[in-house]
């Protein structure tokens, strides 16, 4: 007997050994075959047309068997991938979901005509759910997926065991709500689906609806992107539920580090009083779990764990927040040095956050025998040492150096001796930045240094006059004279020095060579700036403040 195009194509691919288990199906062959998406689509459209054009009741067994694979291929379409299958991604995902829906209706019609109960199966329905989850149709897709899932459960409870919803079915609906973009109730709807799944399984109404770690992961993610004020509490409750199910024998619902990180993220984003303290408690609990026996020793703080808690402390503006943020960074440094685990390597941003936290500290009281600027400089020194020892992720940059200088400026209200000591650290840090192989000074660094000159050195002193001149002249040579540098230089310099170095140049008409490295974000400057020729071919970073 002559085989149809549909049966030949599917059988040819099935001989490669690709499994039909959801979601790994014939779609994988499309994606990895090397053919362009248009060819994939033409192939799918041709097979779909053949199935749809066959009279109801006359589908061959081969066509019925191949239909779920075809639907899965549409659902996992290579034209609307995981990154574009989101709200507002265009019509490709919607078209693919509608193609799966059309094939499902065809199978249902065939099932009705033939009286067979195994034509429209769970595998086929899961492809339909997955198609809507990836469609990018927002709330409509999520509602449609939820409606299909409810219908599946109703039919299963009515006696049709061929459409029993399983974990993959619920996962797709949860994913649809997570991706829906419905900020008002997406997380609540995902939570409701997960609770329903758990209750069905525990009541014995559906033994295949067993929630796993991925289901909880999706629901937690939905909460963390919702902006809902109850997010921290809800995510913690989900974690507690996971642990309870795991202890009761559901090994597929084992909590992992990622789940704990969702809890940390929820507290970090909440902005609630005590959020940093609670995040710290969760991090400490993770560290204790890592010391237990398997499987709890698999729950270990990772980069995201430490980074989230450190940033939460830094942004909390609570008492001792800078010290707390630094203590988390130190724990991570210690873990990295002891284990050599690359995933525990602090990056530049973590160091910058902690240095900046010290630079914003209002209290000038010593902490562990250090003033804030000394603590900031100590962090930068540790960062440089760690980078030189091979930790490439923590390369020092201009932001860290500038924050140390900023921390020094905070001592403007202290005694003359303390101001001189702080200025010495600021000057040394700025000179180190100017000669560094890691970074180069920008307009903010120059402006901050001039602010230190104005606030830490006594008015009228020759040293103040000399350093203000040197910093401004170097800023001009490096093309870093923005509105901040101008205002800080005017504050630091005497009227005579300001007039001398500015000459006939007006602040609203600066030479291009003075300003070419000032970013467009300095709108006050760029509204008036005129270009007067190309920038210098290169910057001499080794130019110091003194001749």
Image (cartoon, helix red, strand yellow):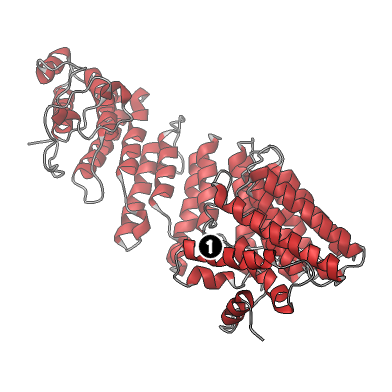
* Image position, residue 466 (x, y; %): 13, 26
Foreground of the two, 349 or 323:
349
In this rendering, the answer to whether 438 lies above or below 12 is: above
Q: With 86 as the anchor, is 165 left or right in this view?
A: right
Foreground of the two, 267 or 457:
267
- Judged from the image, the secondary structure of the residue bearing numbered disc 1 is helix
* Image position, residue 140 (x, y; %): 69, 44
Q: Residues within 10 Å of mark 1 (few under 14, many from 20)?
A: some
* Residue occupying image coordinates x 50% and y 51%: 307
* Residue occupying image coordinates x 23% and y 22%: 486
Foreground of the two, 319 or 520:
520
Q: With 77 as the anchor, is 123 left or right in this view?
A: right
Residue furthest to the left: 547
Q: Quadrant of residue 96?
A: bottom right
Residue furthest to the bottom: 1
Which residue was labeled with disc 1?
41
């Amino acid at each position: 007997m002559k085989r149809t195009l549909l049966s030949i194509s599917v059988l040819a691919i099935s001989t490669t050994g690709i499994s039909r288990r959801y979601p790994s199906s014939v779609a994988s062959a499309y994606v990895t075959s090397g053919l362009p998406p248009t060819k994939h689509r033409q192939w799918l459209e041709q097979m779909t047309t053949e199935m749809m054009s066959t009279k109801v009741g006359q589908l061959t067994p081969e066509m019925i068997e191949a239909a779920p694979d075809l639907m899965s291929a549409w659902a996992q379409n290579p034209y609307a991938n995981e990154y574009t299958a989101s709200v507002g991604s265009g019509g490709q995902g919607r078209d693919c979901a509608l193609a799966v829906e059309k094939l499902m209706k065809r199978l249902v019609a065939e099932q009705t005509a033939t009286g067979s109960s195994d034509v429209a199966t769970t595998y086929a329905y899961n492809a339909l759910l997955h198609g809507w989850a990836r469609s990018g149709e927002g709330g409509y897709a999520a509602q449609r997926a939820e409606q299909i899932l409810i219908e599946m459960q109703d039919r299963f409870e009515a006696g049709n065991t061929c459409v029993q919803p399983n974990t993959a079915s619920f996962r797709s609906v949860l994913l649809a709500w997570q991706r829906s973009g419905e900020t008002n109730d997406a997380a609540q709807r995902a939570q409701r689906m997960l609770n329903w799944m758990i209750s069905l399984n525990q009541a014995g109404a559906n033994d295949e609806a067993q929630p796993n770690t991925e289901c909880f992961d999706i629901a937690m993610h939905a909460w963390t992107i919702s902006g809902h004020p109850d997010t921290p509490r809800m995510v913690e409750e989900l974690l507690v539920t996971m642990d309870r199910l795991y202890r009761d024998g559901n090994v597929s619902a084992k909590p992992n580090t990622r789940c704990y990180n969702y809890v940390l993220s929820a507290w970090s984003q909440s902005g609630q009083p005590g959020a940093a303290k609670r995040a710290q408690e969760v991090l400490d609990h993770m560290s204790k779990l890592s010391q237990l026996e398997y499987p709890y020793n698999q729950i270990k703080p990772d980069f995201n764990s430490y980074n989230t808690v450190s940033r939460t402390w830094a942004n909390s503006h609570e008492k001792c927040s800078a010290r707390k943020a630094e203590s988390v960074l130190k724990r991570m440094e210690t873990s990295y040095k002891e284990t050599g685990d690359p995933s525990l390597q602090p990056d530049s941003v973590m160091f910058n956050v902690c240095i900046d936290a010290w630079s914003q500290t209002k209290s000038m009281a010593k902490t562990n025998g250090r003033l804030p600027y000394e603590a900031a400089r100590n962090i930068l020194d540790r960062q440089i040492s760690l980078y030189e020892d091979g930790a490439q992720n923590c390369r020092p940059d201009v932001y860290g150096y500038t924050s140390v200088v900023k921390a020094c400026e905070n001592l403007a209200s202290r005694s003359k001796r303390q101001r001189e000591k702080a200025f010495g650290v600021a000057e040394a840090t700025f000179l180190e930045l100017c000669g560094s192989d890691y970074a180069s000074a920008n307009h903010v660094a120059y402006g901050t240094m001039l602010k230190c000159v104005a606030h830490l050195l006594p008015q009228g002193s020759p040293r103040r006059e000399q350093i203000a001149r040197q910093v401004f002249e170097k800023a001009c040579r490096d093309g870093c004279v923005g509105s901040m540098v101008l205002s800080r230089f005017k504050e630091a310099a005497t009227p005579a020095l300001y007039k001398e170095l500015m000459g006939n140049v007006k602040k609203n008409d600066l030479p291009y060579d003075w300003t070419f490295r000032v970013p467009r974000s300095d709108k006050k400057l760029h509204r008036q700036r005129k270009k007067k020729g190309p920038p210098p071919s290169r910057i001499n970073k080794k130019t110091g403040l003194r001749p």
